[in-house]
Amino acid sequence: MAFGRGAKMDGRRPSSPSSSMCTTTTVVVFVALCMVGAWMMTSTTVFPVEPTSNKKSEPIEVSTSNKKTEVKDQRAEVGFGETDEAAKSGSVSSEKFEDTDNNDNVPDESHSNRDAPEEEKFPENTMEKPVEMAEEKESPKEKEDSKDSFDDANGKSEGQSAKEGGVTGQSGDEEEKITTDNDVEKSDGEKKEDQEGKSEDDATEQPQIEEKVEESGEKEPAAKANEVFPDGAQSELLKESNTENGSFPTQAAESKNEKEAQAASKSSGDEITYSWKLCNSSAVTDYIPCLDNEKAIKKLHSTKHYEHRERHCPAEPPTCLVPLPEGYKRPIEWPKSRDKVWYSNVPHTKLAEYKGHQNWVKVSGDHLLFPGGGTQFKNGALHYIDTIQQALPDIAWGKRSRVILDVGCGVASFGGYMFDRDVLTMSFAPKDEHEAQVQFALERGIPAISAVMGTKRLPYPSRVFDVIHCARCRVPWHIEGGKLLLELNRLLRPGGYFVWSATPVYQKLPEDVEIWNAMSSLTKSMCWKMVKKTKDTLNQVGMAIYQKPMDNNCYEKRSEDSPPLCKETDDADAAWNVPLQACIPKLPIGPSVRGSKWPEMWPQRLEKTPFWIDGSRVGVYGKPANEDFEADYAHWKRVVSKSYVNGMGIDWSKVRNVMDMRAVYGGFAAALRDQKVWVMNIVPIDSADTLPIVYERGLFGMYHDWCESFSTYPRTYDLLHADHLFSKLKKRCKLLGVFAEVDRILRPEGKLIVRDDAETISELESMAKSLQWEVRMTYAKGKEGLLCVQKTTWRPKEIEASM
């Protein structure tokens, strides 16, 4: 009994029942105070033995049972958000704390006046002044040390709960104050009953706390052997539940709980379901969302400058799937594909009827044949290519001249045969009456995009192409101040060549003569020098070759400022949806400026750091730019050789058209040099503008916004590679539309390789599975992941509503 223990500790026994009421009351109060004092001494709080002394007493160690008593007392008397039943039972199970991440169970500390000093939290009482005095005698260093330990263990407002083995978030000092205040309001008998109840409950609770400590595997230092700390998971819960917000949850806690719940849901196999439908477009199997936007095209006020052939993207990217042509087959492998493709894959015959006599394309049974001809090279592109070099040896295909732009490419036979001279050609043509010409090119394994020279700049940086070629490309270069030819001037590298093969060069019809004279005047005013005018006797065509100047001397000596020089504020590299300008950008000045001298010869330029990239600039990955470049290349060589080529089970003989959806320095493409592939390097418009570096290496690419559709036909790439692209896109647009675009441009049996954070990888894997793609590899380490999936021929049956 508590009373008996108190009497024994005092060394006296009550004299007799006949004592006066005053004496009895005095004894009871005294005994109660002794009990309180004894109880306080059994806590882990350090009290000075001599309150008047500056020396601190030795800590008094208590058993775990006493610590458990404190836990129970606090919850029962103060009521930290518990239900009445829990308070009565005094039970504090481990499950209770595992659920306290939701602040419905957070201790209600709103009564503690958190902004007030600790001594003002509770009403002053003369009976607890000795305790307060003892606390005040603690040295500032001791208090500071105590506070630091709280911050490290369970956050600022945890007080001494962790130190004393409690899990309620109250300090021992506060608990003493709370208990004392309650005792003042109670009768002596009530206090005795409370003490007895607490002791009994303590004996019951003890094994649970010890078991929890053992489960946590925590081993405390000798000085803290009596402390009960929760395990790591519980510590986080305690930190979360210790905020002084009363019974109201915080947004941070709610969000954290929801994310954890979603992650748990994903790990348990509950995945988001996706409902796919076929696109309902008049373009059917050839649907290009940004080029087949009929509603936007109908609203155009003019088509004079080919506005109807430019990009007009839907406000929301489509999330539908493009159907496959009937009888679609696996594409023929390179290099055989350069000469023939399956007719069922590109079932169009109009171009064969219209251009068959020029050896563009012919129909032969199940195949479409490509004899290698063109409007200006009926007898084959290779002879035409060699004729250019014979006329101008300095052009040096595959050495000095490595990256070429082919304007109005047709079926891209010129670019296709340039591979034989180790030259990379970016071919483009509009989606017009020359039905599916770019689609033919890509089906053949030749790089090309759908684009037009209209009212906007082409999506390339300035001064990057070694040669620009136009063979009967049907572009009126000379009109409107030469605006279109000036766009080529922006793209052409200083010292680069423009090869123009067209009837005005070699025919004497009045219209041809007029165009020739206009072109001669325009090129002279642009300071282009005609270095060669020759004829191809076999093909009976002629060509004129112009060279762009290497410096600004000619511009400064012109008698007329026409076309004018661009303003100093003009950024020649800005190319995404930028209107054309009829002006000439000034050429770079200085030995360390891009474009001031010609790159290294191919193939040395592939691996050598560009001369204008040095340590004075910071690279994309944070190192000095030159070191960044070298580290990036070394990284991708290692990844490609050890993982992509040999570790993923990809048959690279079946891979030809490759796209790096987020190229940085072009390291991925450079590492694939030994494979018989070409890589379209995409630099997203919201990424660092490193595309000029890609071109400097003898590679090519373009700018693009992946929140929009890409300017290519469906089913045109064998492999797409995305390094930390999708996680960045999630901040700007919905991934579902982006993944639908990936499905559109990827061929059946084509591969998608993604390197990204684990959360994004999981999301993409779910989308791929919903499309019934084959998951070939998924790997995660820490927060990073790798995914390789393969597209199948599956298509949904349902067609979406009218677009």
Image: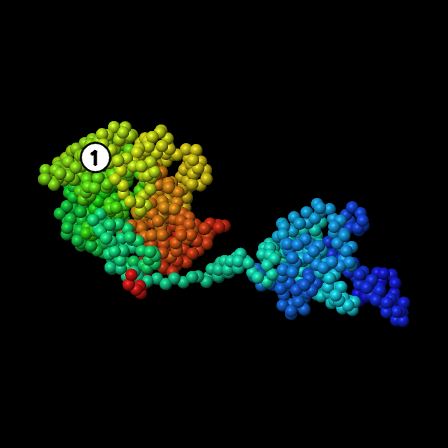
Measured from the top left, where is residue 698 in percent x and y?
32, 37
Give 661 or 573, whichever is nearer the viewer.
573
Whether residue 10 can be seen here: yes
Q: Secondary structure at mark 1?
A: helix
State the quadrant of the C terminus.
Answer: bottom left
Q: Residue at x 83, y 62 (%)?
A: 30
State the quadrant of the N terminus.
Answer: bottom right
Measured from the top left, where is residue 329 in percent x and y?
26, 55
Q: Quadrant of residue 371?
A: top left
Q: Residue at x 21, y 46 (%)?
A: 410
Measured from the top left, where is residue 658 in percent x and y?
32, 47
Q: Residue at x 38, y 48 (%)?
A: 722
Name the residue that disc number 1 marks.
523
Above or below residue 147? Residue 566 is above
Above or below residue 71? Residue 458 is above
Q: Residue at x 35, y 62 (%)?
A: 276
Q: How many marks can you see?
A: 1
Crowd around label 1: few <14 · some 14–19 · many ≥20 (10 Å): many
